[in-house]
Amino acid sequence: MTITDTSTISLRALRWPIVALFGALLADLFETFVDPVNSGVSEKVYTGAVHEGRMVASAVALLLTALVVPAVWGLTRPLTGRGRILGRIAACLALLGALGHAALSMLYLVWIQVPKGDADRAAMISLLDRITNAGTTGIVVPLFIAFPLAFLALFASYVRARIASRWILVPVVAAPLCAIVLPAGDVAKTATALTCLLTASVGLVLGIRSAARRDAVAAEACVDSTQAPVAPVLATA
């Protein structure tokens, strides 16, 4: 019998964490396209904030990205040997990333109120500049960074556990590079990065499916090896 250091996994057992994983990524992708702001530029924030329906939709989508928490927790819990530490790190980062997106969704709801009332446009833009450029806002920056890092740690944990192919790390590493250096607008950059993560997620599912098949074949071989010596005895009885 071959003893592995990771619990047996299957697509059926992980179906809900997988659904949550794709749900979180698709919610983030939806937010990217519906977001009328999509920038830290104060004038664009002021102009986009008048689209109240889209701002609310963006806030809701950001809250839905919290699905990353049950997704990462459920997917990494079976890792008891290789990849276990990376899996725990991914779970912690997922929680921090969800907190960051929750804070951002609240900020969107605040921005909706900025163009309303009789406040002067220039004064409101100046206020947004002060909020954006305030050094104290750096406190929550690690929460925003934690969201993509959670996916990197998640996929790396499955590669470490030898469940998924190391090739899924290619789109995972490409995601932040696309978001930073791609010569395109903010929407295109973010959408491309999220598409890379969705591609890696598909590779993760295929890896889990392949690992489940290997475990099934190994289990059958183990049963056959224990029953084989009994066959000749039965034949001569």
Image: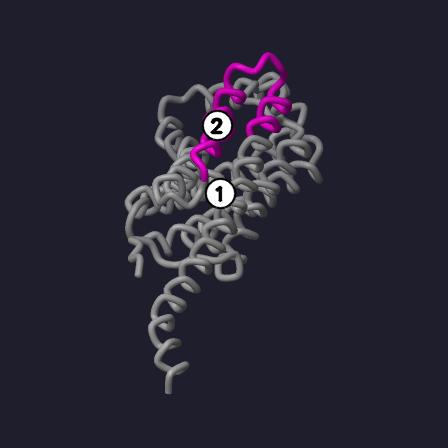
Give the camera-side residue of 35 and 136: 35
Picture residue at 30% right of the left edge, 46% below the top: 82
Left or right of residue 186: residue 34: right
The residue where tag 1 is placed is 102
Determine crowd level at label 1: few under 14, some 14-19, many 20+ residues with C-alpha closer than 10 A. many
Relative to 88, residue 49 above or below: above
Give the camera-side residue of 66 and 215: 215
Give the camera-side residue of 60 and 26: 26
Q: Position of residue 109 (x, y in %)?
A: 58, 39
- Residue 117, image quadrant: top right
Distance CA(mark 2)–CA(mark 1):
29 Å
Q: Is residue 221 magenta?
A: no
Amino acid type, callout 2 = Val
Precedes in sequence: disc 2 or disc 1: 1
Determine crowd level at label 2: few under 14, some 14-19, many 20+ residues with C-alpha closer than 10 A. few
The residue where tag 2 is placed is 170
Q: For the C terminus, which image quadrant?
A: bottom left
Picture residue at 35% right of the left edge, 31% below the top: 139
Q: Position of residue 145 (x, y in %)?
A: 41, 31
The span shown in magenta is 165-193
The answer to whether marks 2 and 1 mark residues whose Cβ atoms lie closer than 8 Å is: no
Amino acid type, callout 1 = Ala
Secondary structure under tag 2 reads helix
